[in-house]
Amino acid sequence: AQTVTQSQPEMSVQEAETVTLSCTYDTSESDYYLFWYKQPPSRQMILVIRQEAYKQQNATENRFSVNFQKAAKSFSLKISDSQLGDAAMYFCAYRSARDSWGKLQFGAGTQVVVTP
Amino acid sequence: SAVISQKPSRDICQRGTSLTIQCQVDSQVTMMFWYRQQPGQSLTLIATANQGSEATYESGFVIDKFPISRPNLTFSTLTVSNMSPEDSSIYLCSARTGLDTGELFFGEGSRLTVL
């Protein structure tokens, strides 16, 4: 069974600064997807970024980028130029490519606090 | 992408009663999933709902407690039966589209408080 671990319950960052959230996962598979989702107080789960394991290049989406280390089973999220609107709970998630149904397994989450 | 609407957004329920949550998607989707998020916790998968067949439940969740319907490709319901305070949670509906890009799309969740 796969597990997703987020070891940082909370991270604080000042506006315009950079913060990095860590995520590690345990799997015996070679093909899978990894995701970062954002959940603001509105409860809506919003996809931040997606990484396919077979791609060596790290995914980027504007101010969000990942550092995907497949051998180390590590998938960290970097938020650059942090904005007040980035304050939310961030969840790392795993999906096996073998799972045709497509269910996701989530980590415990990291609360990001952005201070002015 | 898919836009998912859930009803009710929130509710306060009495112990021993049942409540049905509705999930409507604006387009046809393949698989639908129901997650539970207990206060301050992560998301835990309750079951996977495939149209035309009985839902598949994860370990620790049973059909008698969480019956699910999936009558068509755009709609699903989750019932929380014989509720107790331990069922106070956010229940999230999610879906995977036919153009499978890997991620799931989520509704805004239904916050249930059981007194």
Image: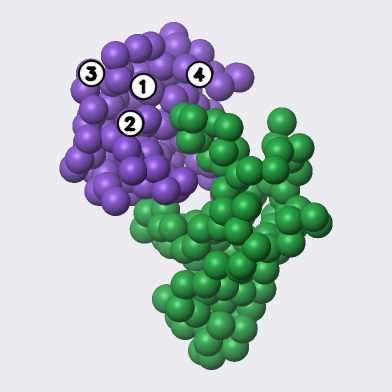
Chain colours: A green, B purple
Give how far apart the Cα atoms at labels 3 and 2 are: 12 Å
* Numbered label attached to residue B71: 3
Which quarter shows the C terminus of chain B?
A: top left
Residue A25: x, y in percent?
72, 48
Q: Is the residue at mark 3 from the same chain as the one at mark 2?
A: yes
In contact (CB < 8 Å): disc 2 and disc 4 = no
The residue carrying mark 2 is: B30
The residue at the point 42 percent across, 48 percent down is: B101
Q: Is the residue at mark 4 from the same chain as the one at mark 3?
A: yes
In contact (CB < 8 Å): disc 3 and disc 1 = no
The residue at the point 57 percent across, 53 percent down is: A52
Task: Work out whether mark 4 precedes mark 3 in sequence or the reverse, and give the earlier one.
Answer: 4
Q: Is the residue at mark 1 from the same chain as the one at mark 2?
A: yes
The residue carrying mark 1 is: B50
Would residue B60 be found to the left or right of residue B107 on screen? right
Task: Work out whether mark 1 precedes mark 4 in sequence or the reverse, and give the earlier one.
Answer: 1
* Residue type at the position of mark 2: Thr
* Residue type at the position of mark 3: Pro
Q: Secondary structure at mark 3?
A: strand
Question: Which chain letter goes with mark 3?
Answer: B
Q: Secondary structure at mark 4?
A: strand
* Numbered label attached to residue A104: none
Q: Is the residue at mark 2 from the same chain as the one at mark 4?
A: yes
Classify A96 as above or below A58.
Answer: above
Would residue B39 be found to the left or right of residue A5 on screen? left
Give how far apart the Cα atoms at labels 3 and 1 are: 9 Å
In contact (CB < 8 Å): disc 1 and disc 2 = yes
* Numbered label attached to residue B57: 4
In contact (CB < 8 Å): disc 4 and disc 3 = no
Give how far apart the Cα atoms at labels 4 and 3 are: 17 Å
Task: Work out whether mark 1 precedes mark 2 in sequence or the reverse, and give the earlier one.
Answer: 2
